[in-house]
């Protein structure tokens, strides 16, 4: 799985690919969803990694769902 961008990538795209800044308002759940290039057969950490590696023309996303049985507080989730 490819988890980083080439060295000449912009800082913003590099951070999105690496999903580094989880605390910022710019974080989006799409940064946590792996994608598969149907062209090359390579898995990427997220769509941003595929874009910066110039392999985003034909992607397949994983599909998943989360079901919560309890309403957890943010404090409970962090611990």
Image (tube, rainbow, N blue to C red):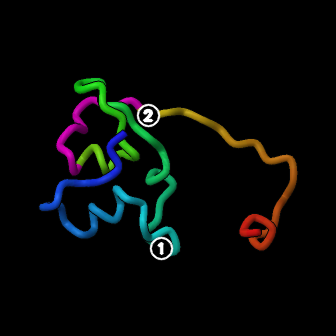
Residue 20 in picture, x, y percent from top left: 42, 66
Does the segment drawn in magenta span residue 59? yes
Query: Looking at this rendering, what residue extends furthest in the right direction?
Result: 70
Vertical position of residue 55 compared to residue 23: above or below: above
Q: Give the labeled residue for mark 1.
A: 25
In terms of depth relative to the viewer, which is nearer, 15 or 25? Answer: 15
Q: Is 51 on the left-hand or right-hand side of 19?
A: left
Q: Main secondary structure of the magenta part?
A: loop
Q: Which of the 4 image quadrants contains residue 11? A: bottom left
Does the segment drawn in magenta span residue 15? no
The residue at 52%/74% (across/down) is: 23
Q: Which of the 4 image quadrants contains residue 44? A: top left
Q: Is 39 on the left-hand or right-hand side of 77?
A: left
Mark 1 crowd level (few <14, some 14–19, many ≥20, 10 Å Cα): few
The boundaries of the magenta stretch are 52-60
Q: Give the labeled residue for mark 2.
A: 61
Q: Earlier in the sequence, mark 1 or mark 2?
A: 1
The residue at 30%/49% (across/down) is: 49
The residue at 40%/46% (across/down) is: 45
Q: Judging from the image, what secondary structure is the residue with disc 2 in?
A: strand
């Amino acid at each position: 799985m490819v988890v980083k961008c080439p060295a000449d990538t912009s800082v913003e795209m590099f951070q999105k690919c690496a999903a580094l800044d989880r605390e910022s308002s710019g974080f989006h759940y799409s940064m946590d969803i792996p994608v598969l290039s149907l062209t090359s057969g390579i898995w990427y950490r997220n769509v941003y990694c595929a874009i910066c590696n110039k392999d985003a023309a034909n992607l397949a996303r994983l599909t998943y769902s989360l079901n919560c049985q309890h309403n957890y507080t943010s404090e409970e989730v962090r611990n």
